[in-house]
Amino acid sequence: MGFIKKQLLKVIEWKDPTNDVMVYRFPTDDRYAVMNGSQLIVRESQCAIFVLEGTAGDVFAPGRYKLESSSLPLLTVIKNWKYAFENPYQGEVYFINTKQFTDRKWGTTNPIMMRDKDFGVIRLRGFGTYSFAVDNPQVFMRELFGTNKLYTVRDIEEYLKKIIVSRLSDVIAESKVAALDLAAKYDEFGKAARIFLQEDLNKIGLQLSALYVENLSLPPEVEKSLDTRTTLGVLGDSMDKFTQYQAASALREAANNPSGGLAGAGVGLGAGFAMGGMMMEAMRGAGAPKAEAPAAAKCVKCGAAIKEGAKFCPECGAKQEAAACPACGKPVKAGAKFCPECGTAISGKKKCPHCGAMMPEYGKFCPDCGKSV
């Protein structure tokens, strides 16, 4: 006869054999047609949409339906389909999976830059999981899958990952949480980002059921520095313990490096001892009080500053002779203000008129010749 007789479909249903198909178009093409009285079966976590000439009509929730004009009121009104199903239906039937697509993975392709009060500008990498589902089938059809025969999670996964990372980056940066406290805020980050993301997903008919942050990690070099700081905190402030720690680390590295041998261990030990010594000296220098410069001596005659122990004044040339304390009689250096033995104040000086020796100006007897002055 030159043509292929169409197969009249009595039951329209979709048994999903996979876990990632979101939309399936039932084959109503030149080989198949839907007649009046056909049965439509929509299973749990599914819905069905009838489309005629590119226009979406009725949406069927889970259940069993007998297809006739009265069961498709929207499509009948839109297309003035007065005698629906008296002739074979040439439209399309789409089954949309409305179940939860769980345990989907997200992760940062590029690190998140943020400013931290302890470490300055740092880079964060993170990963986690999320779950989503189709919330508005008609919006989802119009905005995303269109008239594709098959639409899977893989077709939308990359798009969802990008907007999740974008929104989560904003939440973390605006929170200004210190890098060392990020682990305590994973749940708060997930909830805050979910609120912002839902506004974006509403535009494409999806619902974000859950969003979890599993890890936010610092760069390896920063983590290594934190590990060293933690180790030193356990050891305490003792530089001896720090030196022992450096030596033990050098020996361990030498043992793991057969080609280095004892030479490598020696280099590591030397570096450990040297660093420990430098840090000890630095701490001593920082903690020890600065030594005061000794007070300059003064000339016994003119009062000019002279070198300690000098015998003559460079200004007036006077001989700098030691005097005796007027109270205890012990020798007192020239220019001294107090006796080093008894602490008696030493005031001005005068010469003995008999022998010329220097003596306290208030003294009554010369300590050299013993004569009364």
Image: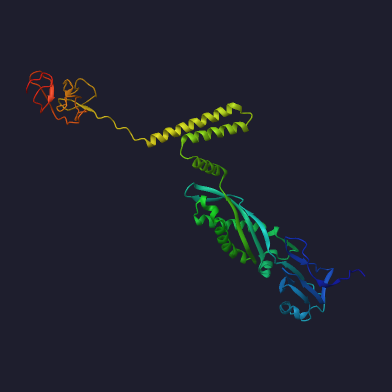
Q: Quadrant of the N terminus?
A: bottom right
* Nearer to the camera, 82 or 46: 46
Q: Is residue 219 above or below residue 194?
A: above
As drawn, is 307 to the left or to the right of 47? Answer: left
Q: Residue at x 62, y 56 (%)?
A: 162
Q: How many marks?
A: 0
Q: Residue furthest right?
A: 1
Q: Residue at x 64, y 57 (%)?
A: 129
As drawn, is 251 to the left or to the right of 14? Answer: left
Position of residue 205 measured from the top left corner of the image (x, y, whole percent): 65, 67
* Nearer to the camera, 64 or 334: 334
Q: Residue at x 85, y 68 (%)?
A: 31
Q: Quadrant of residue 304?
A: top left
Q: Residue furthest left?
A: 372
Q: Quadrant of residue 310?
A: top left
Q: Is residue 57 above or below residue 249?
A: below
* Nearer to the camera, 373 or 80: 373
Q: Quadrant of residue 203?
A: bottom right
Position of residue 87 measured from the top left corner of the image (x, y, whole percent): 82, 77
Q: Quadrant of the C terminus?
A: top left
Position of residue 236 measured from the top left corner of the image (x, y, whole percent): 47, 40
- Indicate the colouring scheme: rainbow
As drawn, is 313 to the left or to the right of 270? Answer: left
* Nearer to the camera, 24 or 125: 125
Position of residue 20 measured from the top left corner of the image (x, y, whole percent): 72, 60
